[in-house]
Image: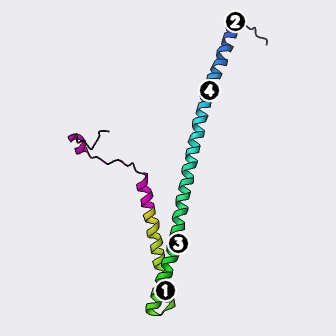
Amino acid sequence: MISRMTAANTANVWKAKTNVRVLRLKQGSTRVAHVQARRQHAVKEVRMIARIAGTMFLSVIVFVIVSLLVSLGVLWLTGGVVRGAVIGVVCGFAAAIVVGTVSAVAERTGERPRGRGCDENERSNGRAGCRAR
């Protein structure tokens, strides 16, 4: 089946080519935005892994130091090696858990906005320190 090329068909081809060009431009800007979003996500991921690794490293150091110091203290007071080791390990675990918890809380408070919070009464009274949002 052979079709004839008319002026109307030629105009439609030109419109179709223009539409394709516009679509490619839109897709290009969408791709750039997508790449930027992926890059930001990767940076956040690396920061998160670094925070977790730092917290784990600090917890291990605290565990070892507290375990040794408490074990030596209990050994010196009671003279029992096994009792000193058990109490030292328990205290070391407790100290490591406390360090992990404190660092997690510190990270969460660091993510909050720095502004001072306002309640409904302050906004309705129109105090100078509180802006309506």
Real-space Cα separation, disc 2 to disc 3, in angstroms: 81 Å
**What amino acid type is highlighted by mark number 4?**
Leu
For image coordinates 49% across by 86% down, the residue present is 72
Q: Is residue 76 above or below residue 33?
A: below
Asked if the residue under mark 3 is in contact with the one under mark 4, i.e. CB atoms within 8 Å, the reply is: no
User: Which mark is drawn over residue 61?
Assistant: 3
- Residue 114 appears at what percent x and percent y? 37, 49
Q: Which residues are magenta?
A: 104-133
Please tell me how crowded label 4 is: few (under 14), some (14-19), or many (20+) other residues with Cα within 10 Å. few
Side of 5 where 79 appears, left or right: left
**Residue 3 locus on image (x, y percent):** 76, 10
Residue drawn 48% across the image and 89% down it: 75
Question: Which sits earlier in the primary sequence, circle 2 or circle 4?
Answer: 2
Q: Which element carries disc 3, helix, strand or loop?
A: helix
| Residue under pointer 1 | 72
Q: Position of residue 117 (x, y in %)?
A: 31, 48
Residue highlighted by disc 2? 7
